[in-house]
Image: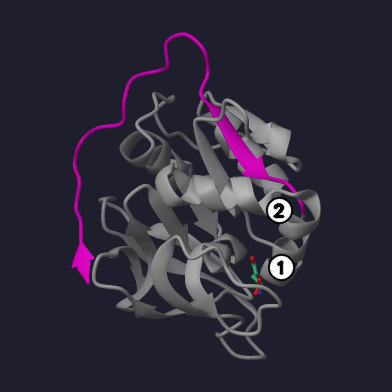
Amino acid sequence: MTRTRMSRPFSAAPQGAAPRVGVLSLQGDFEKHGVMLRALGCEPVRVSLPEHMAGLDALILPGGESSTMLRLLEHTGLRAPVEKWVRSKPVLGTCAGLILLARSADKLPLPSLGAIDIDASRNAWGRQVHSFTDSVEVATFADPFVGVFIRAPRIERVGRAVQVIATYHGEPVGVRAGSAVAITFHPELTDDTRLHAWFLTEVAGLAVHPPQPVAAR
Ligand code: GLN
């Protein structure tokens, strides 16, 4: 497992057209990602049909129920274009989104998309403790990040070419493989835009507003 520490500052406020960032909007908490994206000067695009994929600069796969999302990807015809996208273009998966991006996960009705060489174990924090909030370490940030874990998966195996970008008590909770990033927690449920800003600038190469707390919502 490799860890990265990057100190490049976030880029200045965007010039010209706002980056168009798709958010898979079949099910789950896609709205909250839209709030984050707008705070960073991006245009969120709801993706629920294949034609919505046109002209995107990056894609987010939100939290929700990965099994339901996999079925809906199939029903809407989105599976093929999304599967193609995640192989080579910037994608951020959060919680269920991480399960979709993983090479494998347990108890799925259909194969996951396999963009990142990790194995995930779903709902793996125990029956009683379905949700918790605690400080996580993100390699690229000087200060800790609040990790909101909701019936979160655990990353059971990390492939050799995969970078660990976030840890919780030493356990990987965020990974990156090229332009694909996946985390087991929910940054969109905090008011901290750093993770989205890092993904959009450092991974996707887009110009966004510097990170700042999202106003009351
Ligand atoms: N438990 C969900 C699943 O297995 C993920 C939960 C979430 O996205 N918050 O898909």
Can residue 110 be seen?
Answer: yes
Q: Which residue is mark 2?
A: 29
Q: Are marks 2 and 1 in contact (CB under 8 Å)?
A: no
Q: Secondary structure at mark 1?
A: loop
Residue picked out by circle 1: 65
Label 2 amino acid?
Answer: Asp
- Look at discs 2 and 1 and give the one toward the viewer: 1
At label 1, which amino acid type do we have?
Glu
Residue 140 location in percent, x, y? Answer: 26, 51
At 76% from the left edge and 41% from the top edge, which residue is drawn?
49
Q: The magenta stretch spans which residues?
A: 1-26
Of residues 211 and 43, the one nearer the viewer is 43
The image position of residue 200, as x and y in percent, is 42, 36
25 displayed left or right of 59: right
31 over 67 or under it: above or below: above
Q: Is mark 2 within 8 Å of ligand 1?
A: yes
Quarter where residue 182 is shown: bottom left
